Image (cartoon, rainbow, N blue to C red):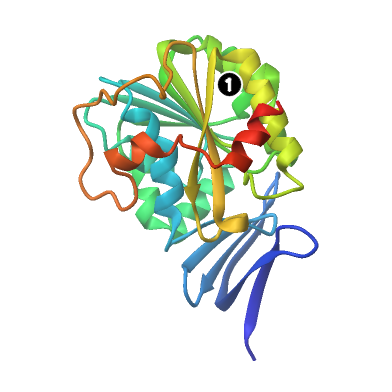
Amino acid sequence: MELWFTEKSNDSVGLTLLIKEHLYHKESKYQTIDVLESAYYGKVLVIDKVVMLTERDEFIYHELLTHVPLQYMENPLSALIIGGGDGGTAREVLKYRSVNRVVLVEIDEEVIETSKKFFPTLSFSFDDKRLEVVIEDGAKFVKETDEKFDLIIVDSTDPVGPGEVLFSSEFYKDCSSILKDSGVLTAQTESPFDLVYRPVIQNIYKNLKTGFKTVRMYLGSIPTYPFGLWSFAFASNRMDPLKEELKNPFIPDGLKYYNRELGRCVFNLPNFVKEIIDET
């Protein structure tokens, strides 16, 4: 008998995967964690019945979230990752030789342990001596830290449950206060093709604008995320990617998705997406 997993994006649309084996199940303090072995996408990390990543396409999300901002920075030294317990975002940031310190703040240690067990191509980043892991609420860390960073990456779950606070106006203001003068924040901001989430996206960008002078959206195509189209925010008080040139003289070898030609054009938005942002 075949086993299929379906993640419903709404009442009439979803993603369905043929599953070879249910490898792992864990009820953590904050959420339900599952690892599935799929027939096409390899191992799949599922949190609260939502696909977080698959082995086959995770590189798209992680490269877009990291290399887009890092290529606009001439000499990035430090980064703060909020969430990202699978290690994929840290893996990409740590590819930059100039980066000497990365702090990853994850509220749920079980996500990190699950990744170490089942996703070694992501979790090997936890062995890098430049990476410090803090098990704590990300919003609390941002509010209380005295450290300033060149880059903040909000690699969070959807704006529900423990991740909801990471989309608030107060959180974005706190992030702005711990960025260096020319620093950048990037964050995942859901699918603009999802009619249910359009008001949520509008609210996210409204909140971002309370903390940052410049807020831009960029897009990427991720097959296993709802509707295959995903948005990201680029926020800064000094830098506007529509007016700046790429400054980083270094680009890591072996990237599967990002290149500099792509990095210059991801901010070009379809008309229907522009209309969503203009309504904020």
Mark 1 element type: helix
Q: Position of residue 82 (x, y in %)?
A: 53, 31
| Residue situated in front as seen by the camera: 52 or 126 | 52
Displayed quadrant of residue 197:
top right
Displayed quadrant of residue 159:
top right
Q: Residue at x 29, y 26 (%)?
A: 246
Residue underneath mark 1? 141
- Would residue 211 appear left or right of 241 to someone viewing this image? right
Q: Residues within 10 Å of mark 1 (few under 14, many from 20)?
A: some
Q: Residue at x 35, y 43 (%)?
A: 125
| Residue situated in front as seen by the camera: 189 or 265 | 265
Above or below residue 175? Residue 33 is below
Q: Is residue 10 visible?
A: yes
Classify the position of the N terminus by image quarter. bottom right
Q: Position of residue 229 (x, y in %)?
A: 55, 51
Q: Position of residue 30 (x, y in %)?
A: 70, 44
Q: Residue furthest front?
A: 271
Q: Position of residue 241 (x, y in %)?
A: 41, 24
- Would residue 237 appear left or right of 245 to someone viewing this image? right
Q: Residue at x 80, y 62 (%)?
A: 11
Above or below residue 250? Residue 272 is below
Q: Residue at x 66, y 28 (%)?
A: 278
Identify the amino acid type marked 1.
Phe
Above or below residue 208? Residue 148 is above
Classify the position of the C terminus by image quarter. top right
| Residue situated in front as seen by the camera: 9 or 132 | 9
Image mark count: 1
Displayed quadrant of residue 228:
bottom right
Q: Residue furthest bottom?
A: 1
Q: Is residue 67 visible?
A: no
